Image (spheres, rainbow, N blue to C red):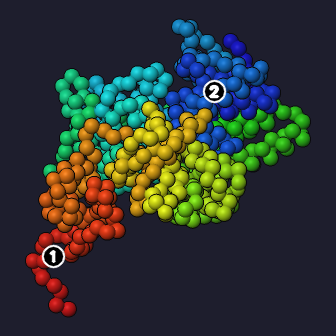
Amino acid sequence: MKSYETIVVGGGPAGMMAAITLGSKGVKTLILDENDELGGQLVKQTHKFFGDHAHYASVRGFEIAQKLQEKIFQDTNIEVETSATVIGIYPNKMVVYAKNGKEFKATYEKLLISTGAMEKQLPFINSDLPGVYGAGAVQTLMNEYGVMPGRRFLIIGSGNIGLILAYQLIQAGAEVRGIVEALGKIGGYAVHAKKIKRLGVPIFLKHTIVRAIGNESVLGAVIAKVDNNFNIIPGTEVEKVADTICVSVGLTPLSELAEQAGCKVEYIPQLGGYVPVRNERMQTSNPDVFIAGDLSSIEEATTAMIEGKIAALEMSRNFIKIAANKKNIENEINDEIKTLALFRSGPKSAKIRTGLEKFGINIKHVPKIESYGVQIGPTGKLRAIVDCTEEIPCNSCEAACSFGAIHIGENLNSTPVVDYDKCTGCATCVTACPGLAIHMLKEDLENSTALVGIPYELLPLPEKGQKMWALDEDGNYVCDSIVKRVVKYPNKTNIVYIEVPIEFSRKVLSVSFPKKESPFVCRCEEITLDKIERVVDSGITDFEELKRLTRVTMGPCGGKNCKLVVLGILSRKTGVPISKLSHGTSRPPVKPVEFSLFMKGSDPT
């Protein structure tokens, strides 16, 4: 049996940061993790993280894991045991773990438990079929082991994990048939949702999965609409073809070891489920036991790292004898608590704040959040367009801009403001943004074209001179475009500059290679580009006649989404500028209404 000053159980972001902090204070520490390498969820995350640069913003998850691993293995105060499964914690301050088929014991003076969380399950018919996975399992197979468990995926749940998984699947060459969400709004960050919607992935809000289709494996799924009480609305069932169903409906903390260590546990749904009661410094009801990360509350890796540092600093006070050093640690703790309060001060953390209040932990005295809309900037100048209007904790663009053109302010949750007098068009912010929420734009008024710079993280990369489809915010075809140049960056967020007609300059947000199947131009009436082009090629060049023959623009949206696109196709095929084409007649009703409205007649008053 070995004895240590501190033991850290769990080598994810919280545990690693705690071990690094303890080691830096000269505290002899053992870190235990059941995986082959330290990093927890970080090792399978290929996306860039939000936050600030002091906490690895704009760095991809697996790279953060590598940086933290390096610090740990360089510190002689830290001993690491991987492939070590902790099987019990006993009252005499003893941790028992299994490794290589043998049992080991170790004692501690202070203990940090950062065991993380596990995925919640969702009951539905045939949920036991091969092909039904948790989202984290798919990430592990795909990003760690290079195994793709399917080709066509349906994702259940639109939290950040589900949204990120959808994007990673597309990067790996898979097809995502849709995301199903029971709520009436996206659960995760809007920038994550926009990123996949631009790639054509539909999100079915107020829907749930009814059952998986198949006998020996998944062949598809039945989804249906739900009411405000989450009851299935009869008659709304539709089938979706998929060979893999990914369940991503949240996480719940793994609190068993904390209970064994004598920590009081309470059910706090806002924090994820059963969590140990603790104070602001991560100390539980057992004064020798601390917690951090998803065991404390289901949040981001950034907050987990800050919690791990706070817990470690408080633990290290027990081993420091010099008063001046203790005072320095107290200052460090207070600084980290303030930083954590900033991260949690935005609207996305409202649920977490409510949960923490039940422990008497209140977020207060944080700078005001400032919110702004999308700024377009001066026409004709190559400039950054920042489509980031949701209040989330991130200042990557501000930190990346060496010209001071982007301002976030004191509170990380404020939305960016661009000073276009200072913006040089360097596009550094585009490649730094974790949400791919920034693109470049420059109009050429003389030639009636525009240059649009799109962040691009897919393979293969387009090449100069290639013809591409320009897409809108929902992945719909807008117009053809020509690649003018491709700029590669070491962080793998490259920029593809395309030329489009100037009238589409603010509509184009994505690009794709032309596919064999024709894209939808009018989704309401399911009219494809190929169908419109065939009608125009037959000699129909009048918009009204095209409309009558194809029903294009005659759907529920009344052409609001596709009229300009159709006129662009007519212009390209005929050589007549859009400004010279007739755009049809606008007729009532402008928006869809029930037909019974007209049967009832007008109100005599």
Of the 4 image quadrants, the one containing the C terminus is: bottom left
* Label 1 Cα crowd, 10 Å radius (few <14 / some 14-19 / many 20+): few
Residue 318 lies, with reference to residue 103, above or below; the image says: below
From the viewer's side, name the closer residue of 399 and 600: 399
SS at badge 1: helix
In the image, residue 182 lies at what x, y percent?
A: 32, 49
Residue at the location (58% across, 60% down)? 381
Instruction: Using the rendered image of the protein, determine whether residue 320 is visible from the camera's viewpoint.
Output: yes
Q: Are marks 2 and 1 in contact (CB under 8 Å)?
A: no
Q: x, y (%) of residue 214?
A: 19, 28
Q: Is residue 329 above or below residue 72?
A: below
x 49%, y 53%: residue: 451
Q: Position of residue 231 (x, y in %)?
A: 25, 51
> In the rendered structure, which amino acid carries the disc numbered 2?
Gln
- Seen as rendered, the residue at the extreme top is 101
CA gap, disc 2 and disc 1: 64 Å
- Front-lying residue, 468 or 109: 468
Please state the horizontal and vertical placement of residue 267, each as a whole percent of the image: 48, 44
Position of 548 with respect to 131 (left or right) is: left
Q: How many marks?
A: 2
At a point 62% along the width and 42% down the height, the residue shown is: 57
- 467 relative to 452 in the view: left or right: left
At mark 2, the secondary structure is helix
Q: Which quadrant of the figure has residue 155?
A: top left
Instruction: Identify the image quadrant of residue 518.
Output: top left
**Residue denoted by label 2:** 66
Q: Residue furthest bottom?
A: 605
Residue 197's label in the rendered image is none
Disc 1 residue type?
Answer: Leu
Q: Which mark is on residue 597?
A: 1
Is residue 109 visible in the rendered image? The answer is no
